Image (cartoon, rainbow, N blue to C red):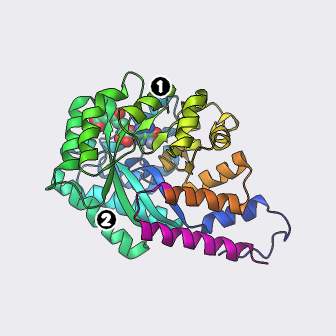
Amino acid sequence: MSDRSSVPAVGTSDRDLHAFIAGLPKAELHVHHVGSASPRIVSELAARHPDSKVPTDPEALADYFTFTDFAHFIDVYLSVVDLIRTPEDVRLLTFEVARDLARQQVRYAELTITPFSSTRRGIDELGFMAAIEDARKAAEAEFGTVLRWCFDIPGEAGLESAEETARLATDDRIRPEGLVSFGLGGPEIGVPRPQFKPYFDRAIAAGLHSVPHAGETTGPQTVWDALTELRAERIGHGTSSAQDPALLAHLAEHRIPLEVCPTSNIATRAVRTLDEHPIGEFVRAGVLVTINSDDPPMFGTDLNNEYAVAARLLDLDERGLADLAKNAVRASFLDAPGKSRIEAEIDTYTAAWLAP
Ligand SMILES: O=C(O)c1cccc(C(=O)CC[C@H]2O[C@@H](n3cnc4c(=O)[nH]cnc43)[C@H](O)[C@@H]2O)c1
Ligand SMILES: [Zn+2]
C-alpha cells in the first residue's frame, strides 16, 4: 500500500482514491489482446516491420490513436494487427500485456484474442496457440496474474471468419488450455448477430461461455439478439441497453453482467461525453456492472483509470470501488476457489486501507 501520511485524514481526496485503486486487487474481463499493446511494444514491432504505416515514435502514436469514429478505430486497430507476424511477436505481446496488467494489481484477466486475424495473415495456428499458452504460463509464474482467453469472431470479416474461429476454438488438437469463452467483435452496423448462432452453438456445446459485444455501436435490439440467439452470459459494452427499460429489467433479473468500458466509448465516439455515459442508469436499474479497459493504450487509459472514471460517474468511495472489483470477480469464468481467493484479497486490502 502507498504512503498516505500527507493526505487529509477525513473524507477521501481524489489522490487518495487513486492510490486506493492502484493497490486494489482487480479482475479485467474485457480487454483485447492487440488493443493492449503498449506504445513501447507497438513501436518495437513497427521498427521490426518498417513497411508499416504505424509510427515508430511512441509520441506520434498518441496522434495516430485519435479516432474520428468507430470505423476509423477498426482501421487503425488492423494496422497494428498487421505488425504481428510471427509466433515470437505473439508471445512478446502477450507476456508484455500480462506485465502491464500485473502492475495494476490485476489478478485475473480474460483477454479477447482474434485468432482468425493472425491465421489469415499467415501465422501458423499451432505456433500461435503455443505462443499464447507459453506467455500465459510464464506470466502466471512470474507475476501471479492468471490469464484466460476469449476467442472472438471479427464479425465484419464474414462467416468465413466465424467458421475459422469456431474451428480453432473447438478442435481439441488446437484449442488452447486457457480458452474459456467465445466472443464476437468488430463493427456492429451491417453485421447482424443472429447469423452467428450456429457458431456460438458449437462453441457452447464445446464448453465455452458466450460473451459477444453488443449494443456498442447499434441499438438495444442487438443486445436482445445476443441474449436470445447467441445465449450471451455477459455482454461486451451493452451501452445502448439504456434505451430500453425492458432490456435493463431483463439484464438485472437474469444477472447478465455488462462489461462497461467508459473511456473506450468516448474514444470511438459511441458516447459523446463521459457525463452522458449510461453507467449510472445501469446501476440504478440493478444491472451487474463490471469495469474494463477494452484497448487501453489505444484509448489513452488503463484499468485503474477506468475505476477512477467509474468512481466519479457513480460517486463511489473505497467500499463502492471494492464492490465494483468484486462484481468483476463474480462475473468472471474463474473457478470458485479462485474467485473466493481474490474476493478475500479485496476485502483484506479494503479493511486495511480503511483501518484507523
Ligand atoms: O483481421 C481481418 O482481416 C479483419 C477483416 C475485417 C474485419 C475485421 C474486424 O472487424 C476486426 C475487429 C477487431 O477489433 C477488435 N476490437 C477491439 N476493440 C473492440 C471494440 O471495442 N469493439 C469491437 N471490436 C473491438 C476485435 O476483437 C477484432 O479483433 C478484421
Ligand atoms: Zn471490446
N-terminal label among 2 and 1: 2
Nearer the observer: mark 2 or 1; the answer is 1
Under mark 2, the amino acid is Ala
Q: Can you identify the residue that label 2 sits on?
A: 135
Q: Position of residue 19 (x, y in %)?
A: 68, 66
The secondary structure type at the circle numbered 2 is helix
Label 2 crowd (10 A; few <14 / some 14-19 / many >=20): many
User: Is residue 82 visible to the viewer in this orientation of the structure?
Assistant: yes
Q: Can you identify the residue that label 1 sits on?
A: 221
Range of the magenta residues? 331-356
| Residue 146 belongs to the span the image colors magenta | no
| Residue 353 belongs to the span the image colors magenta | yes
Which dot marks residue 16? none
Q: Residue at x 36, y 25 (%)?
A: 191
Q: Position of residue 180 (x, y in %)?
A: 33, 55
Q: Residue at x 40, y 57 (%)?
A: 333
Q: Ligand 2, what quadrant?
A: top left
User: Is residue 115 visible to the viewer in this orientation of the structure?
Assistant: no
Under mark 1, the amino acid is Gln
